[in-house]
Amino acid sequence: MKSEFYPILNMVITNVAIAFCLAPFLLVLWKKLQFERAYTFIGIYWLVIGLLNQYNWVQSTNDNELQAQLLFLRNFFGIHLALIIFIVYSKGKKRKSILLTLLAFVFFETLMMVWNGIENDSNVIIIGIGSLIVMVYSIVGLIEYINEIYHSPLENAMSFISAAFLFAYGSITMTSVLNVLRIASPTDPNESFLYYVGLLISALLSCFGLWRYAEAPSFYKGKK
């Protein structure tokens, strides 16, 4: 009974997560939040992730190699867009720090691809390190939010975005560690389940943060 239930649960979580991938993007358009640059990139982020997940609905998922390549692409683009979102939202020294980190990461991943080519081992290392970087800046953002007494609607919303990235890239970092230790592989159904659970929580938190900002009084939205 348990062995029959797990594949069904995996399928449900996967499909619900994919459906919710496009929700933040649609919410940005519906509530006209694109005037805030950070939200524009958040919308782009979820649009890219959502489109790269559509393969699960239009083709058979039995091609494990293709699934691993698509998982790499989703995480690859997601990491860069997440760091760009932090850059757009941040100011001063923090913005410069994130920008330098992004450039260093691009240099690192370029070296890895030139040295090892595009194959699973180098992909796992690239995604693992990139996810860890996003996690670090997500935690920093949450700590800064907690340490402040008063918060603007934008800061409230971005705290949920930081939490969203923490869940998403926390699960990706965990699976990357399992891959490096050879405990799991990118085609492992358990790893896929963990990825989509993190993705679903991330999408829901993003939607909640965007909704809170959209519903905040206009007078307070311009305040920092």
Image: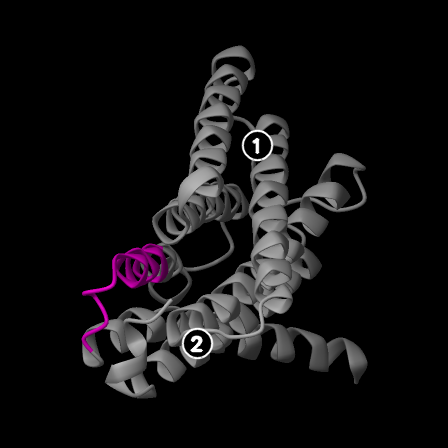
Q: Is mark 1 on a helix, strand or loop?
A: helix
Q: What element carries label 2?
A: helix
Residue kind at label 1, given as amino acid type: Ile
Mark positioned earlier in the residue sequence (1 or 2): 1
Q: Which residue is drawn at 63% across and 31% down?
A: 125
- x%, y% of residue 78? 43, 49
- x%, y% of residue 159? 52, 68
- x%, y% of residue 161? 48, 65
| Residue at numbered disc 2 | 209
Q: How crowded is mark 1: few (under 14 residues within 10 Å), some or many (20 or more)?
A: many
The answer to whether residue 131 is visible is yes
Residue 34 in the figure: left or right of residue 157: left
Number of on-image labels = 2
The answer to whether residue 195 is visible is no
The quarter of the picture where residue 147 lies is bottom right
Can you say whether 96 is above or below 195 in the image?
above
| Residue 42 highlighted magenta (yes or no) | yes
Mark 1 or 2: the one toward you:
2
| Residue at numbered disc 1 | 126
What's the mark number on residue 3? none
| Residue 185 highlighted magenta (yes or no) | no
- Who is closer to the viewer here, 166 or 114? 166
Q: Considering the image in quadrants, where does the C terminus appear?
A: bottom left
**Where are the magenta residues, as a range?**
32-48
Q: Residue at x 30, y 63 (%)?
A: 39
